[in-house]
Image (tube, rainbow, N blue to C red):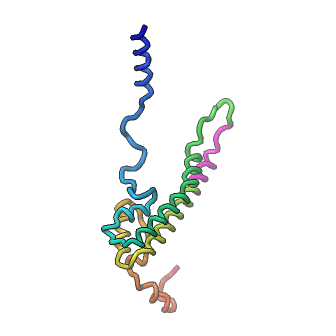
Amino acid sequence: MKHVVAVVVALALASCHHDDGATTEPQDSPKAGTTPVAYLLDAGKELHLNAEQTKKLKDLDVVLAKDLEPLDARLHDVLHPGFRNPRRDPPPDVKGRIDDAKRLSKERAARVDNALHRALDELDAAQRPAAVKVLGKHDIDIDDESAEAPNDAEGSGSGSGSGSAE
């Protein structure tokens, strides 16, 4: 009888273990924090960040992570609504969920983009191109005009209609 119980317990424990070693997080997730700002912190030596810049970027990372948390939770709820009993529950509003997911994704991207621009504003003109390259290595494209031409912002407004059509 003891052997039967031991076998049952062993089978129960073996069937409960589902860890196949795979993670759900991306392989190149940032080490310093949870947001793309952390990529800049991870590359601190390459960017030659000083102590004040590092502190400001860490603060931005924390604020952005707290800002994204409710958005990510809502996005998860929209994409994974949970159990639905087809006999009792009404059919899901798929188009509405898709629209909500698009809206939440755009809002999330805008907040991340805003935080990355604020992070780049904390860097010196010489550090910005390297920071844009670091972000590019992680497939984060940012259109930072000051990274390519730090002094062009002052001179571009002095012409009267310099031929740019909008």
- Which residue corresponds to the image point at 46% horizontal and 59% vertical from the top-left? 35
Of the 4 image quadrants, the one containing the N terminus is: top left
- Which residue corresponds to the image point at 39% horizontal and 54% vertical from the top-left? 29
In this view, 93 is above or below 71: above
Q: Quadrant of residue 42?
A: bottom left
Residue 63 is left or right of residue 22, and the answer is right
88 inside magenta stretch: no
- Which residue corresponds to the image point at 55% horizontal and 54% vertical from the top-left? 69
Q: Quadrant of residue 36?
A: bottom left
Residue with the most extreme top position: 1
Secondary structure mostly seen in the magenta stretch: helix
- In this picture, which residue range is highlighted in magenta? 90-103
Residue with the most extreme left position: 46
Residue 106 position, x and y percent, is 55, 60
Q: Quadrant of residue 16?
A: top left
- Which residue corresponds to the image point at 43% horizontal and 72% vertical from the top-left? 120
Residue 50 position, x and y percent, is 37, 73
Residue 147 position, x and y percent, is 39, 76
Residue 32 position, x and y percent, is 40, 58
In the image, 27 versus 84, the foreground residue is: 27
Label count reads 0
In the image, 45 versus 150, the foreground residue is: 45
91 inside magenta stretch: yes
In the image, 88 versus 135, the foreground residue is: 135
In this view, 18 is above or below 144: above
In the image, 162 versus 30, the foreground residue is: 30
